[in-house]
């Protein structure tokens, strides 16, 4: 997918978790974020990173927004440190700009929206991370328009 002349290009959002990565993408004009996939992490973490770098390349992403899970008081714990390490590692593998974005409450909001939509528990587990990534990315997109 090639971005049209004058458009900023696609943005990708990532919700980094210990077990899964949620992935979302914007349109080339960076207006709307949509969930894309949930990638499994773990022993085969290289598979998730390979799929992610392939998505970045195929979508010609201009920017990657990685969720930064701050605590309620704004401080950063181990999950935020892990997200920062992930963003640094990703930045070394791509030419796209990598930004961190406060993601407080996004997983809870994603879970709530899926419950409200009547999505079964087993299906929610498969999609909540991608929906959270879309919420992270949409928040970032909206902040750019203000």
Image (cartoon, helix red, strand yellow):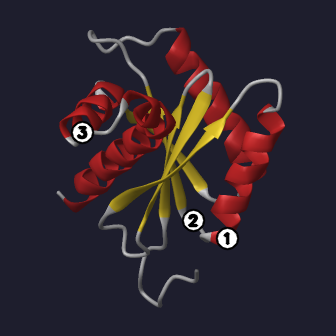
In front of the other: 112 or 72: 112
Circle 1 residue = 58
- Residue 111 visible to an observer of this rendering: yes
Q: In the structure shown, which secondary structural element does the residue marked by tag 2 occupy?
A: loop
Looking at the image, residue 112 sits to the left or right of residue 97; the answer is: left
Circle 3 residue = 118
Q: CA distance from mark 3 to mark 1?
A: 33 Å
In front of the other: 23 or 60: 23
In front of the other: 77 or 23: 23
Circle 2 residue = 61
Total tally of numbered discs in the picture = 3
Q: Position of residue 35 (x, y in %)?
A: 43, 53
Q: Residue at x 24, y 51 (%)?
A: 143
Q: CA distance from mark 1 to mark 2?
A: 8 Å
Q: Position of residue 60 (x, y in %)?
A: 61, 71
Q: Reading the chain from its start, which is encountered first: label 3 or label 1? A: 1
- Residue 95 visible to an observer of this rendering: no
> Looking at the image, do the residues carrying marks 1 and 2 touch, with CB atoms under 8 Å apart?
no
| Crowd rating for badge 3 (residues with CA inside 10 Å; few <14, some 14–19, many 20+) | few
Q: Position of residue 54 (x, y in %)?
A: 73, 60
Q: In the structure shown, which secondary structural element does the residue marked by tag 1 occupy?
A: helix
């Amino acid at each position: 997918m090639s971005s049209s002349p004058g458009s900023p290009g696609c943005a990708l959002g990532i919700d980094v978790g210990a077990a899964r990565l949620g992935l979302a993408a914007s349109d080339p004009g960076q207006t709307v974020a949509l969930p894309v996939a949930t990638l499994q992490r773990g022993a085969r973490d290289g598979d998730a990173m390979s799929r992610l770098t392939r998505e970045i390349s195929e979508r010609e992403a201009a920017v990657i927004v990685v969720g930064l899970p701050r605590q309620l008081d704004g401080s950063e714990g181990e999950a935020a440190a892990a997200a920062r390490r992930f963003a640094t590692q990703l930045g070394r593998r791509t030419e796209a700009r990598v930004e961190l974005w406060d993601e407080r409450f996004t997983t809870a909001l994603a879970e709530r929206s899926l419950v409200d939509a009547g999505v079964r528990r087993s299906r929610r587990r498969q999609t909540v991370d991608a929906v959270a990534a879309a919420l992270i990315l949409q928040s970032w997109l909206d902040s750019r328009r203000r």
